[in-house]
Amino acid sequence: MAEMVFAELSELPKEEERWGAKLSVFKEIVEHHIEEEETTVFKSARESMSGEEIQAIGDRFDLEKRRIEQDLN
């Protein structure tokens, strides 16, 4: 669903009256997805993974985040 709304948003000019509404819908979809992951997926991961595995994933995430930030600058 998010992909579909994002594609529609990408095709609309920002001056288009519907652009702001589409952006709001996209934001709500993303926020709902994040909330679901934080409550369901992360809980399952904590229950089934060791602390070392979780730390390794966090380290990889931080490394990738820094790489992307550098690419954007």
Image (cartoon, rainbow, N blue to C red):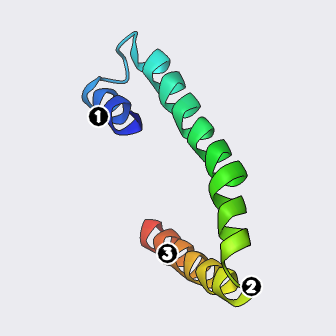
Identify whether 10 is placed above or below 58.
Answer: above
Q: For the point 31% across and 32% down, which residue is it?
A: 4
Q: For the point 72% across and 60% down, which residue is it?
A: 43
The alpha-carbon separation of the residues under discs 3 and 2 comes to: 29 Å
Q: Where is mark 3, residue-wise?
A: 70
* Depth order, front residue of 72/30: 30
In the rendered picture of this protein, how many numbered marks are placed on residues? 3
Screen quadrant of the N terminus: top left
Q: Position of residue 65 (x, y in %)?
A: 55, 72
Q: Nearer the viewer, mark 3 or mark 2?
A: 2
Say which label, 3 or 2, has the lower sequence index. 2
Q: Residues within 10 Å of mark 2 (few under 14, many from 20)?
A: few
* Depth order, front residue of 39/72: 39
Residue found at the very far top of the displayed protein:
17
Amino acid at pointer 3: Gln
Say which label, 1 or 2, has the lower sequence index. 1
Amino acid at pointer 1: Ala
Q: Nearer the viewer, mark 1 or mark 3?
A: 1
Q: Position of residue 20 (x, y in %)?
A: 48, 19
Amino acid at pointer 2: Gly
- Identify the element where label 1 is drawn: helix
Q: Where is mark 1, residue-wise?
A: 7
Q: Where is mark 2, residue-wise?
A: 51
Q: For the point 48% across and 68% down, which residue is it?
A: 73
